Amino acid sequence: MKKSLLLLSLGVFSALQLANAGDITGTITLKGTPPPEIDIGPTMTAQSPDCAAMYAGRKFPTTHFYMVGSDGGLGDVVITLKGGDLKSTGASAAPALLDQKGCVYEPQIFAVQTGQKIIARNSDMCVHNVHAKPAADSGNPESNQLQMPGGADLPFTFAKPEAFLQFQCDVHPWMHSWVTVVDNPYYAVTDKDGKFTIKNVPPGKYTLVAMHRKLSAIYGADGKTVTGYKGMEKEIDVTGTGATTQDFTFTMK
Amino acid sequence: MLTAGLTFLLIGLGGLVTSNNAGMSVPDWPTSYGYNMFTLPIKFWKGGVLYEHTHRLYAAFIGFLTTILAVWLWLKDSRKWMQWLGVAAFLLVVVQGAIGGLRVVLSDAQLGIFHGALAQLFLVLVCAIALFTSRWWQNSAVEKQIAVPRGLRSHVLYVTILIFIQLMIGATMRHQHAGLSIDTFPLAYGKIWPDTSPEAVAAYNEHRMEMNGENPITAFQIVLQMIHRLVALLIFLGVVAAAFLAGKKLGGRDGLAKFAWFWTGLIVVQIALGIATIETNKAADIATLHVMVGALSLLAGVLWWLVAARRTTLTKFAPAGQNGLN
């Protein structure tokens, strides 16, 4: 009996730990039907047989611009926080890994802090080039480097915040990844069910921002140029007790 | 002739580079992955590198042939203007190579537009040289020539200039690296003239699946494609008019009249390839053929005009009553 009570108490205590004060959680959903993803196989087979050979007996990858779960949850949404006195800890943060595996980038959507190192690794048996293409006015440097199979990892750091900075391989044109560079350590990327958790946020009032690469692009007033990304925003108040929950719903136009 | 023919193939090879988004697959120049360009191991010739690197090698070969041509003209052709034309061809191919290299080194897509346009001009120049060194040009009997009316020559010149403008529009479209800004034909997003409001453009981008990571499309690019379609129609009407006029003024059996109908056929093929580019979502081989036939269309107009001008000039030396002028 005592053992059962002890186990029950531990369970309750652990459950409480999972929703700590200072955590922000939520779910992003998508209303509307996105277009079907494209099978990369035919292009890969035609242009790079050595890449296609890696998928012998396996399904070829598809694009995954809209990761929609069974309940409409939308993955690959970047959640960031602004306001307060939040500062980047990127210089001391663990490096983020951008891997080239099966001639696709993994992950395709991710986020890092300003000054945080990104390690680009070539896990394939073929040559890739790692071409970082920030926006022209972002202040981040463009670079294009060859990476041999099994070659040295390539480090990248970006000093300025930027949404969806593009990495691409020009040898294999379907290979892309987009990194959002933020200036504080409080961010997340939603999982395949659209869920996110940002842990241990200091109490205070903030603006929570949700951005999706396809759904959050904005255009200049003349409608002629893509000027950046503007996410959905909500004002939130993170208190010292209990988790703060905020959901967002994107709608296809 | 050899240089001209091989240059045309180089336009195709260069077209394949852009059509396969391979322009930056070899990030250094004039080396290739740190190797001397001529010693890059074959194991690297894969994916986009195959297109970009073979295009560089082939371009170097064209440069070599052009150098031989320029030297040969300087030493063997007695016409001063031809000697300088050979020098111009040499300088143009050097500039073209430098622009291509700088496009890569500076990662500047705008330079890609100039590189594409200059390729067309270089093709026209080497083909003109081939014409000027031909037996027909140098040895044509004046009494056999029929003059071409000035109005007809001017009409063909204006249409040819319009074709060059269209090529520049096409090069600008291709080097936006935004894929197809309108993916349906004949309507554009369900309309004769598409909605280009910011809300509409955002919706187009949301529904667009750009597998090769193309840039989002903008209202400017949508309007540019619409202009490209309208100019294509104007060119078609202009070339058809030239063919009818040539038949009427020169007679249906005249070589230039027949060539004008061949030119019309080229434009019809070019329009079909343009439509096919849209219908196949810019399949690399179709889009590249569209570039090559565009080059031929420009060349046809230029050669037609040069031959017409030559014939007219020669008739000035013919005995009176034998110049064929109405």
Image: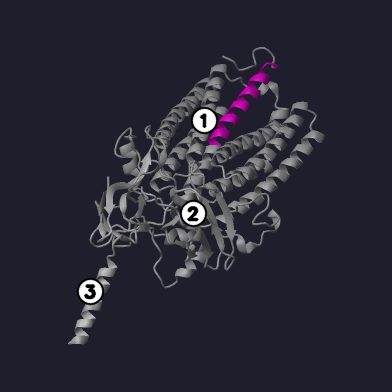
Residue A170 visible, this orientation: no
| Residue A132 at least partly seen | yes
In this view, the residue in front, B245 or A106, is: A106
Disc assigned to residue B165: 1
Rendered view: B273 above or below B150: below
- Chain letter belonging to callout 2: A
Q: Are marks 3 and 1 in contact (CB under 8 Å)?
A: no
Tell me the magenta residue range. Answer: B296-317
Which residue type carries mark 2? Phe
Residue lying at 33% horizontally and 42% vertically, measured from the top left: B202
Q: In the rendered structure, which disc, 2 or 3, sits on the residue that comes first in sequence? A: 3
Q: Nearer the viewer, mark 1 or mark 2?
A: 2
Q: Nearer the viewer, residue B243 or B180?
A: B180
Do marks 1 and 2 share a subunit?
no
- Looking at the rendered image, the quarter that the C terminus of chain A falls into is top left
Q: Which residue is mark 2?
A: A167
Q: Report the predominant secondary structure element of the magenta stretch.
A: helix
Where residue B45 sits: x, y (%)? 60, 59
**Which numbered mark, 2 or 3, is in the foreground of this view?**
3
**What's the distance in space between the residues labelled 3 and 1, CA to CA?**
74 Å
- Circle 1 residues within 10 Å: few <14, some 14–19, many ≥20: some
> Which of labels 3 and 1 is toward the front?
3
Residue drawn at 35 percent across, 40 percent down? B185
Residue matched to label 3: A12
Q: Say if labels 3 and 1 share a chain.
A: no
Q: Circle 2 — which element? A: strand
Chain letter behind tag 1: B
Three-letter residue code for mark 3: Val
The kind of residue on which mark 1 rests is: Ile
| Residue occupying image coordinates x 23% and y 81% | A7
